[in-house]
Image (spheres, rainbow, N blue to C red):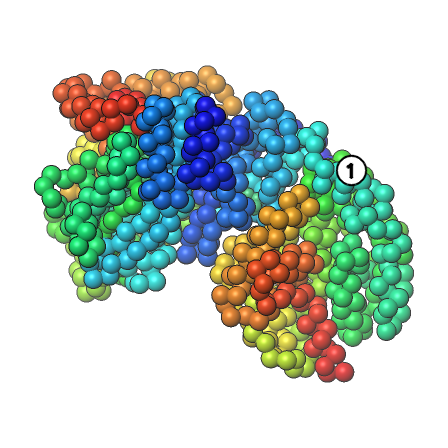
Amino acid sequence: MKKEIIERISAIVGEEYISTRKDVLLTYASSASMAKEPVMPGAVVRPANATEISEILKIANEYKIDTTVRSGGTSLQGEVIPKPDGLVVELMRLKDIKLFKDLRSVRVGAGVTYGELDKFLSEHGLWVPITPESALACTIAGNTAVNGAGPGSSLFGCTGDLILGVEVVLPNSEIIQTGSETNPNAPGPFLRYAFGPDLTGLFIGSLGSLGVITSVSLKVFKRMEYFDYNTYGFDTPEQAERFLIEIRQWDVNAVFASIYEGPVLELFMEMLGDEYGIPPMEWPHRTVSMTIGRVRKDMLESDAKKAQELCKECGGWVLGVKELPRGEWNERLWTFVRASYVHGWHWRTLYHHQTPVNIHRSVEEITKVMDKYGFLGHTAGFFTDHASANMYPHLYFDPTDQEDEQKIVDAHDELAVTLYKTGAVPFKLAPFWKDKMEGTEKYMEFLKKIKDTIDPNGIMNRGVLGGI
Amino acid sequence: MNEVDLDDLREELLQCRRCGICREAVYDLKGFEGICPIWRNTSGFEPSFMRGKIQIAIALLDGVLERTSENAEALYQCTLCGNCTQICGAEFHPAHVIETVRGILEEIPNEARDRLAASISTNDNPYQEEASVKREWVKEMEFDIPTEGDTLYFTGCTASLRMQETAKNTARILHAVGEDFFVMENEPCCGSVLLRTGKQEVARTNAERAAKAIKESGAKKIIVSCAGCMKTLKKDFAELFDLDLPEIVHIVQYAAQLIEEQKIPLKNIETKKVTYHDPCHIGRELGIYDEPRKVIDGIPGLELVEMNPNRSAAICCGAGGGLRSYDPDLSKRIAADRVKVAEGTGAEIIITACPFCETNLNSGADLINSSVRTVDIVDLLAGSIKAQE
Ligand SMILES: Cc1cc2nc3c(=O)[nH]c(=O)nc-3n(C[C@H](O)[C@H](O)[C@H](O)COP(=O)(O)OP(=O)(O)OC[C@H]3O[C@@H](n4cnc5c(N)ncnc54)[C@H](O)[C@@H]3O)c2cc1C
Ligand code: SF4
Ligand code: SF4
């Protein structure tokens, strides 16, 4: 990158917070995304606030520099890999947290992680009830930009559903605020759907290609204290899927309900059973692991009873292994990282949403590519939102074997097409989905028009949001 | 040292999935309040914390990055405190791996490392002091300490050359409880610094020499007061060099047991609110958390208030891994950060069980003009014993 550019950015953030050192650039060439070639940027900058970011984007526009916004760097689908000689804007210095107790909301800077926010809110008896499984490293802003989900989603929906507004530095360097806070006289964030169309929504899932989210305002809730943990066994996928729907229909407060294939659980329990305190056992064809949560005890008791009734009505039986959901829920900020890394393989994922009655279709498609290409993998999913399930297939490979790695990349490509055909939808419109979504041409054209209008020089994360 | 297989090493490095949790995880449930002291006290680019260090290590080993001191800075800018290891979900020990990589990349210039190694080779201590000076403190004791016996007090270079009060107070405790102990005429250096900074081959020769000298001394039991010596003699000698030593205990373990058995009558010392800083070498590396707290509880007059984080999630004092020599300013900033946490507890003093931690935390306190001083646990224990005499 040109020296004069570095000098100008340096004058904004201070020499300490910009680097062009090769060792530093190398560490920004990759992220948690596996089987993805690293790309060396030309510079990395760590601004302190929205004003500095705005000044940086002015320069980026002037020189038409490819710019990648990066927060925790935990994204798994290549969303934060920079462009050659591009500029990485890393946001982990934006650490402000402001609570609006009476508005039941909080505003966080782009560098705040879920772990930090959870600790802060727990001191007030509150929480943000959805936490992605990378919660200790990823930011709320980053998870907004990827439209994430996680434990808590079974009741509260996706991350986007909690958001009341965002502050964004647009690619043209203007700073805007959305939601009720657009009114400078407003006491804080209390309503997302203010001032006409949902411009907040434009930035949810925008993958850093429509602007830099510098703060996120979101809903907070009274922390639940009463939980019921249980597992439910089923002989067929259809029974288990029906159970999930009935749970929602009957307003059973399942904060986290996951569905697992028997062999997948067996594999994981072989590795983690001791850590979870679960004795070896034969798992049924399908297991639903569920945590029900309530603020009030009487409601919890009623929900737990209803869940057991519904399980039987759907043809299942109560397994009673409580350690699995208890571990998943109580240690949700970390436990999945452990489960994902304990086995030593690397993996690629292709996050998607299925309808609950179609969960088995994702399993079938993944099994097919596994058989065809000959590798290990699995998929599990958790209930999310109104009638949807967040699926997170893991395709395993050996990182020291290039052939194996290529096999996964090819299988992954194929899977994007076949999963899409089952009716699944990508909620993180990562580049993996580019050209795989037949029938979305008009939608993508419209999205591109928006992108071109907001970012006429095409500097922000070019080619990442579904390839645009 | 057992030969390092480069393929195995690479495979270990590839266990890192770049999740980034080792940067600054705040995980209330498990007591983590941030992870990496380097990230917190530098400008915070990726190479400052373990995820970046591992990427750089791989690139240096693979030849993607040229082996220059600038490119390798991230490897040395690390206290090897192991807090990242504590939170990491993958099946490897990131801090140990970085230590191994330092050894493999010994060709990369590092003035501080080479200076320390040269001093240990020549003088048997990293402080460029004459080897004979090491036992000088014994002459100032109010009782005789022999050069042979069954129980060896392995003083360590820092206590014998820089923090003599620690050595003297440890000796006073042992004397007070009637332990017949000796201090070697020519005590070797344990070589902790060599291992941490990546001089593995020199460390091996040094360890073999040290183990031989200890064996020849006839010691049946070793007591140490330095956390670094403890970790090196107890763990590294066995695991890295297959060297057997007699039973080794840290003075806090020794004292905790005696307190439990009510064999040290302790008297009130001036009432003080204190906090305890867990040294990485006996904490995360050896799991010695309860014993120092038992000792503190056993000293009448002391009220223990815990810092958050503590125990296995404690943040390092900044002195480890050779950082105090490699980048003294950063090392002291880290110490100052820890002192601020101690200040937040309302404690008047910080107690620790490692001369490195003591020195560095006091340097950190000076940096921010803090009145909170750090003392070694043996100083208070000896004081309490004296009060009852
Ligand atoms: C072990 C593990 C488990 C995971 N589990 C989950 C899970 O349960 N649910 C889930 O949703 N995800 C999960 N992920 C994926 C990842 O953590 C999420 O995508 C995460 O929210 C990304 O946040 P980040 O701060 O790390 O963003 P980054 O990885 O830094 O960036 C992600 C994307 O968002 C953009 N971006 C980041 N910050 C901003 C900003 N402030 N403004 C505009 N654009 C921005 C980037 O340009 C990039 O496109 C997991 C990842 C790992 C490693
Ligand atoms: S060292 Fe462990 S915690 Fe750190 S990025 Fe790698 S896998 Fe994650
Ligand atoms: S060992 Fe300590 S200093 Fe080194 S990277 Fe890990 S946490 Fe940071």
The image shows residue B302 at horizontal and vertical percentages of 59, 76
Task: Tell me the amino acid under the disc marked 1.
Answer: Val
Residue at numbered disc 1: B202
Residue appearing at x 74%, y 50% in the figure: B233
Identity of the residue furthest to the left in this view: A196
- Position of the N terminus of chain A, as image quadrant, is top left
Query: Quick one: B368 or B342, which is closer to the camera?
Result: B368
Quarter of the image where one finds residue B109: top right
Circle count: 1
- Position of the C terminus of chain A, as image quadrant, is top left
Query: Quick one: B293 or B364, which is closer to the camera?
Result: B364
Subunit ID for the residue under disc 1: B
Q: Residues within 10 Å of mark 1 (few under 14, many from 20)?
A: some
Helix, strand or loop for disc 1? helix
The image shows residue B73 at horizontal and vertical percentages of 60, 36
Asked if one can make out residue B353 in the rendered structure from this viewpoint, the answer is yes
Quarter of the image where one finds residue A187: bottom left
Residue appearing at x 35%, y 51% in the figure: A96
Residue appearing at x 39%, y 23% in the figure: A83
Q: Is residue B83 left or right of residue A172?
A: right
The image shows residue A179 at horizontal and vertical percentages of 17, 46
Query: Quick one: A15 or B114, which is closer to the camera?
Result: A15
Residue appearing at x 61%, y 24% in the figure: B66
Confirm or reject: label 1 Cβ below 8 Å from ligand 3: no
Residue A15 lies, with reference to residue A95, above or below; the image says: above
Query: Quick one: B40 or A123, which is closer to the camera?
Result: B40
The image shows residue B158 at horizontal and vertical percentages of 75, 55
Residue B299 lies, with reference to residue A198, above or below; the image says: below
Asked if one can make out residue B182 in the rendered structure from this viewpoint, the answer is no
Ligand 1 falls in quadrant: top left
